[in-house]
Amino acid sequence: MLSSELVILVSLIYVGLLYAIAWWGDKRARDGHSWVRNPTVYTLSIAVYCTSWTFYGAVGTAARNGLEYLTIYLGPTVIFLGWWFLLRKMLRISKAHRITSIADFISSRYGKSTQLSVLVTLIAVIGTTPYIALQLKAIATSYTVLTGWEFGMVEPVRETVSIFSDSGFWAAVGLTLFGILFGTRFIDADEHHEGMVAAIAFESLVKLFALLAVGFFVSFVMYDGLGDLFAQSAENADTAKLLMLPEGGSSRWLTLMMLSMAAILCLPRQFQVIIVENVDERHLATASWAFPLYLLAMNLFVLPIALAGLGALPVWSDPDFFVISVPLFEDQSMLALLAYVGGLSASTSMVIVATIALSTMVCNDLIVPALLRIRPLRLTERDDLTGLLIFIRRASIVVVVFMGFAYYRSAGASDALAEIGLISFAAIAQFIPIMIGGLYWKGGTRTGAQVALTIGFAVWGYTLLLPSLADSGWMDPSLILNGAFGHPWLRPESLFGLTDFAPLTHALIWSISLNTAAYVLISLFTEPSALERIQATLFVDAFSRKGQDTVIWRSSASANDLYELVERFLGRDRAYQSFRQFDQSIDPSWRGKGEADADMIAFTERLLAGSIGAASARVMVSSVAKGEMVSLDEVLEILEETSHVIEYSQRLETKSRELEKAAAELRAANERLKELDRLKDEFLTMVSHEFRTPLTSIRSFSEILVDSPNLDPKQADHFLEIIVRESERLTRLIDDHLDLARLEAGHSDWRAVEVDPRTVLDESIDAVKGLFDAKGVVLTKEYSRNSALLHVDRDRLTQVFINLLSNAAKFSAPDHPEVSVRGEAMDGGYLVSITDNGKGVAPNELEIIFDKFSRGGKYADDKPKPSGSGLGLAIAKHVVEHCQGKIWAESPAGRGATFRVFIPGTIMEAIKPAKPASFGS
């Protein structure tokens, strides 16, 4: 046990240290040498999430419910690791619109609605009250345990103790002064509190160090490591169950995870440090992994401390304060004092940030809009309003903290720390449907959001807050037992007969379900205003728009009036610095000379929005602007017209691309036609030459025979042989042309029969054997074991193979001509490959070589093409395609050419292996 004087002295010294850090941080920021604008400090400031609930209550939860305490930290981990894109979008929007609170954020999305911001502020204040009570209870109880410890007995019942004798009262007073000194010394246009951020980051290190110190002591001094601790705990039936996942507790685990996910997004203090206090969007990337690591470190020794407390302390000891009572039980007073300072850090950081955030909301969204509507006050005519704004915020801090103290005095005694925190989480979770919907659904309306929040908050109050107040004695418990109006279906903890869930899960199911349903349904059946549609577009399309939330004016206002307006709310120095950043040409003697353009008016509105909220800023700018704002309907018309122009332009671009593509295809087709025309002319020239040559020979030798009756018989016989040979050649040429014409016209006679392609290949090889022998071609052939039955015209197929074999012999290497034939049964048919070892075919000729006007152009060696009509491959292509097959050529550089023919058919089982064969000289 420690003396109260020592504990109070340490508390005062620690608070003084925090104030010094905050003062130094603010001074450095004003001097332009901030040392808190880095991702590490930003991450540590987010750790304000770890309040006394974490420092004390997590151990208490682990002692009561085992591993359930992890759910409160798994939710934020999921958000930062997996949903950081949501935080980034919120951050991008808030910076563009100078949003300073969650109430400002939600109201701005739904048309800058004052009514909605008032509703959000009230819910935030009421929902945060139990959480502040939790911190007061933690500070008061930890002080009692540390100074009057008797085996961890908790403080006396508060109703029997006067307010001034209650340590919680003095904790409330201290935290109120602390919040006033930290957050309301001046009005900042950007609402950045760099000194506060520095102090919160320091506190995050202190509470982490204190909790780790207690954890190391428990694990490695009281026990021989974690293994020994867990082994001894497993031997005890009461503690062994804490090491296992609970049976049938999945609904509560899911409930707690959902609540913690909502809390990290919607708690006013978390919105303050994550969004408002952020100075660089890139810091969020570091926090996305560093903050989950911090949570992991904070929870490393939670379960070991809980197990050690259960094993060492009497059964009546309060598990919520094992962090202090275990070191006291082991006579480690200084360690217990360090733990107390860690818990004090966790509590004070939460209350400071929460009260600053709530005081900003109360000032900007409740008090200032109301005062601006009271015309006799003539606020728009006062020279300096900074004092009034600071007073309102300080008064708000006092009210907020002592609302928490009132709850602490009346209802806090009946709940564990964790349960008090969960009540706040469930209240704040009512913001989630309209926040997520507002970020990704343009159809959400202000009316839908207002009704949804009202229903959700009312259900939360009825199903969760009322039972808490009834337990504390504030109201008749019969309401909880019998339901409203005595109807059992209206029991708060089993609404409409839903009795299968715990009170927290039951309250969350009804409140969030009715909240979401009301938001969606009412938004579908209500028409948004013009400003709502504009704001919805700016929020949903935040990443595709670079513009800020601006007001369009028909004429400029007086620059002097705008400057004086900013002076009233920010003071002379800050007004000058702000306008100086807007325009570097402004000097200290500048007093708003001349007329302000639309950009300066919009800048003034955004500047004021950072101090008094978006709705109040619009009212104040409108009060001094001499020009007239363009109506929102006109803005929408402009936007819609611009949208139509953009859409029409996009259609034109699409058509242009389609036309360009069509033009390219036409150019390609034209080039193809030109090539075919060239090939046709070449073909006709070739045909004329081919026909003329045998005709000339026949005519010449015929004339010799007619004109020379006394010609030598041997010579006459030779001339007759030439005439016959040339006649046969002419006949073949004519037959080829007629055959191709019939094939193209579809007038050929086809006599399809079932054939074995290997037999046809062998017959074709025999037919060209004389040609191969004459050229000295070495032929190799190889057939697969299986064959296929092809339903084709046998003679036509033979004609194809003979043509390909003849071409292979003609184009083989002249010194060592080689031709290989391969046949193989494939899935669905038979493939024949005929390869030569010549120069091959040029790559650009592989596609057109089967055209009727083509003889292959230049070959791979770039030599002139050989003689011939060039009709053989065209005929082969027609025959193969008529058989539903495919013919193509392949020609690797310098490795000859391969012509492949695939014809579909039925695979046959092999009877005996086919032997490779070769012949030639």
Image (spheres, rainbow, N blue to C red):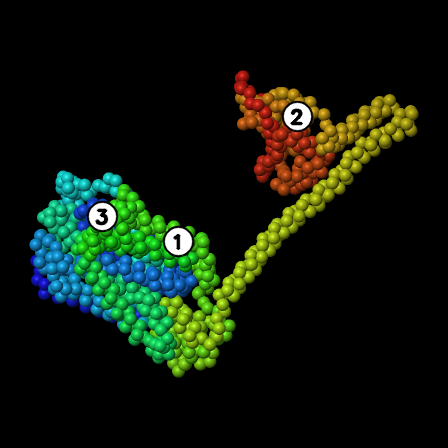
- Answer yes or no: is residue 471 visible: yes
Cα–Cα gap, marks 1 and 2: 75 Å
Q: Would you name the residue on which mark 3 appears?
A: 481
Instruction: Name the disc covering residue 426, or none.
Output: none
Nearer to us in this view, 95 or 685: 95
In primary-sequence order, the first of circles 1 and 2 is 1
Q: Nearer the viewer, mark 1 or mark 2?
A: 1
In primary-sequence order, the first of circles 3 and 1 is 3
Q: Residues within 10 Å of mark 2 (few under 14, many from 20)?
A: many
Q: Would you name the residue on which mark 2 appears?
A: 797
> Outermost residue toward the front?
485
> Outermost residue toward the top?
911
Describe the element under mark 2 as helix, strand or loop.
Answer: helix
Describe the element under mark 3 as helix, strand or loop.
Answer: helix
- Relative to 385, say whether 129 is above or below: above
Describe the element under mark 1 as helix, strand or loop.
Answer: helix
In the rendered structure, which amino acid carries the disc numbered 2? Answer: Leu
| Residue displayed at 62% across by 36% down | 840
The N terminus lies in which quarter of the figure?
Answer: bottom left
In the rendered structure, which amino acid carries the disc numbered 3? Answer: Leu
- Relative to 840, say whether 912 is above or below: above
Q: Would you name the residue on which mark 1 appears?
A: 519
- Quarter residue 12 falls in: bottom left
In the rendered structure, which amino acid carries the disc numbered 1? Answer: Tyr
- Quarter residue 374 falls in: bottom left
Classify residue 111 as left or right of residue 507: right
Residue 418 coordinates in the image, percent (x, y): 22, 52
Cα–Cα gap, marks 3 and 1: 31 Å
Nearer to us in this view, 269 or 873: 269
Disc 2 and disc 3 in contact, CB within 8 angstroms: no
| Residue displayed at 66% across by 25% down | 797
Cα–Cα gap, marks 2 and 3: 96 Å
